[in-house]
Amino acid sequence: MGRREATAIFSEWATKGKDEGMERGHAASVEEMLQLAEIPRNDPYSAIDVGCGNGWVCRKIALDPMCRDVKGVDGSATMIEKAKETDPSGSYFHGNLPEWKPSERVDFIHSMEFLYYLEDPVLMLNMFHDTWLNSGGMLVAGVDHYLENEDSLTWPDALDVHMTTLSEQQWHEAMLGAGFVDVSMHRVGIKEGFVGTLVMIGRKQ
């Protein structure tokens, strides 16, 4: 028997209202991530949140007067339904990744708690760089499941879902290998009992 699809788990959580708990739990880390990211601001920018859940980060980014367009994509149809119900004027897409891709390149990609659910997250980083981002565009991605966060190493078995476990150094090397420049790694949202969300930031030349 194979492991469960992560999208099925997230759909269950959306049905049970756990997405709101995820929003509260990740809010502090995301706030720091957005502050750390040097979003291109010379002109109005476009953005996408990958693994957007109920769309709460999209709605946060949309408050920036310099943001001309923000989209969200998630593999859970139930999450996208909730996003559209909450924000009928927003742009939300149901799509399996890495197969799905935006109709046009963007200036800023945000992703929180998405990459490690992929069989090959390194391939996704390459796709972000090569086919999703405009020249000069920025990626900021956060993961709570990584080698140095020992508490997270039990999650795959506990949830019966695939997670790709990489170290902080491996994530850093993957960003550089994908072609990103000005790459920086951070720990945010640190609190008692939590070593922090691992955040990677990089720019496409």
Image (cartoon, rainbow, N blue to C red):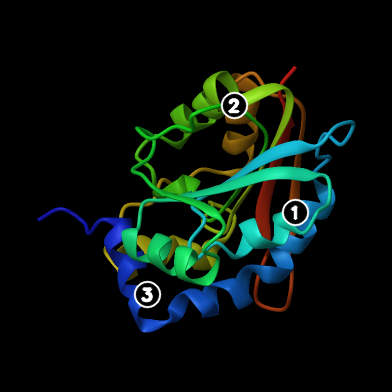
Residue ID for mark 2: 105
Quarter where residue 7 is shown: bottom left
Q: For mark 3, what is the residue?
A: 13
Give the total of numbered labels: 3
Percent x, y for residue 18?
44, 79
What is the number of the mark on residue 118? none
Q: Nearer the viewer, mark 1 or mark 2?
A: 2
Q: How many residues crowd around disc 1 within 10 Å: few (fewer than 14), some, or many (20 or more)? A: many
Q: State which quadrant residue 67 falls in.
A: top right
Check if mark 1's residue and mark 2's residue have beta carbons within 8 Å.
Answer: no
User: Which kind of residue does numbered mark 3 sit on?
Assistant: Trp
Q: Earlier in the sequence, mark 1 or mark 2?
A: 1
Vertical order, 21 against 132 (above or below): below
Query: Where in the figure is residue 25, as x and y percent of width and height?
Result: 61, 75
Front-most of 144 and 87? 87
- Disc 1 and disc 3: Cα gap in Å? 24 Å
Q: Residue at x 39, y 73 (%)?
A: 14
Q: Nearer the viewer, mark 3 or mark 2?
A: 2
* First of labels 3, 2 by sequence position: 3
The residue most toward the bottom is 16
Give the distance between the C-alpha atoms of the residues marked 1 and 2, in whole angstroms.
Answer: 21 Å
Dot placed on the residue nearer the N-terminal end, 1 or 3: 3
Is residue 17 visible in the rendered image? The answer is yes
Q: Does residue 167 appear left or right of residue 76 in this picture?
A: right
Q: Amino acid at mark 2?
A: Arg
Instruction: Name the amino acid type tagged 1.
Output: Met
| SS under mark 3 | helix
Residue at (52, 63) in percent of width and height: 88
